[in-house]
Amino acid sequence: MSILPIRISGDPVLHSPAEPVTVFDDSLRQLVSDMFETMDAAPGVGLAAPQVGVPLRIFVYGYDTDEHGPWRGVVINPELWITPPPAGDPDEELESEGCLSFPGERFPLRRADEAIITGVDLEQNPVELRVDGWRARILQHEYDHLDGYLYVDRLARHERKLVHKITKKMGWGVPGVSWMPGVDHLDD
């Protein structure tokens, strides 16, 4: 296993729709293993293949709570269904999220409270997740990556202006910028 570099906002692989997975082999198993290791080292609660430079429709997730316990897996070639998000502005405390491809920042974003995702696992067995709350947010966030969107692309106008300033200040927004979990210290 190895930790992979995480691409930063502006890399073209993050802003293009990913391709379906068609080959289920040892290289795919290795990619998934490396994605779990990278997600855990970051630390994150999800990681999509485009975030590590692989334009395939696959993501891993891992989240542990007292209420639900450990929740961890992989979804390949997912389809997503959501309830309509509630109207109004997002709650800055309860609805803020961050992203490993826009590290060190969090912004409020309204998401649907319920989500269903279907796809397959590494053995091509069907996967279906029906979740709500924070877990629904994770699935929507990772699914967005597969369609070429970062959560910052969905923010309100005021926050998008701030995102632009941060992107410029940090030297992001160009191809090839990445960081290594466990090595780079982005909060320094």
Image: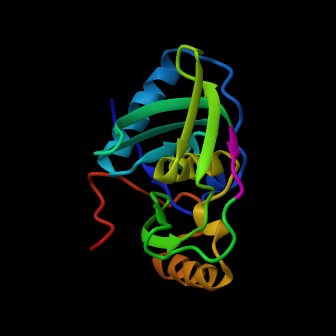
The residue drawn where x is 63% and y is 36% is 117
Residue 127 picture location, percent across and down? 58, 24
The rendered magenta stretch, by its main secondary structure, is classed as strand
Residue 174 picture location, percent across and down? 60, 66
Q: Nearer the viewer, residue 110 or 120?
A: 110
Side of 113 relative to 87 (left or right): left
Whether residue 24 is situated above or below residue 74 in the rendered picture: above
Residue 109 picture location, percent across and down? 58, 68
Side of 1 relative to 137 (left or right): left
Q: In this rendering, does residue 178 appear at all?
A: yes
Whether residue 26 is situated above or below residue 102 in the rendered picture: above
Q: In this rendering, does residue 57 appear at all?
A: no
Figure quadrant of the C terminus: bottom left
The residue drawn where x is 48% and y is 16% is 26
Q: Nearer the viewer, residue 17 or 109?
A: 109
Residue 85 position by quadrant: bottom right
The residue drawn where x is 66% and y is 67% is 154
Magenta segment range? 80-84
Whether residue 149 is situated above or below residue 91 in the rendered picture: above
Residue 102 is covered by the magenta coloring: no
Whether residue 131 is situated above or below residue 93 in the rendered picture: above
Residue 104 picture location, percent across and down? 39, 69
The residue drawn where x is 66% and y is 65% is 86
Number of labelled discs? Answer: 0
Q: Nearer the viewer, residue 1 or 153?
A: 153
- Colour scheme employed for the rendering of this structure: rainbow
Figure quadrant of the N terminus: top left
Side of 171 relative to 185 (left or right): right
Residue 82 is covered by the magenta coloring: yes
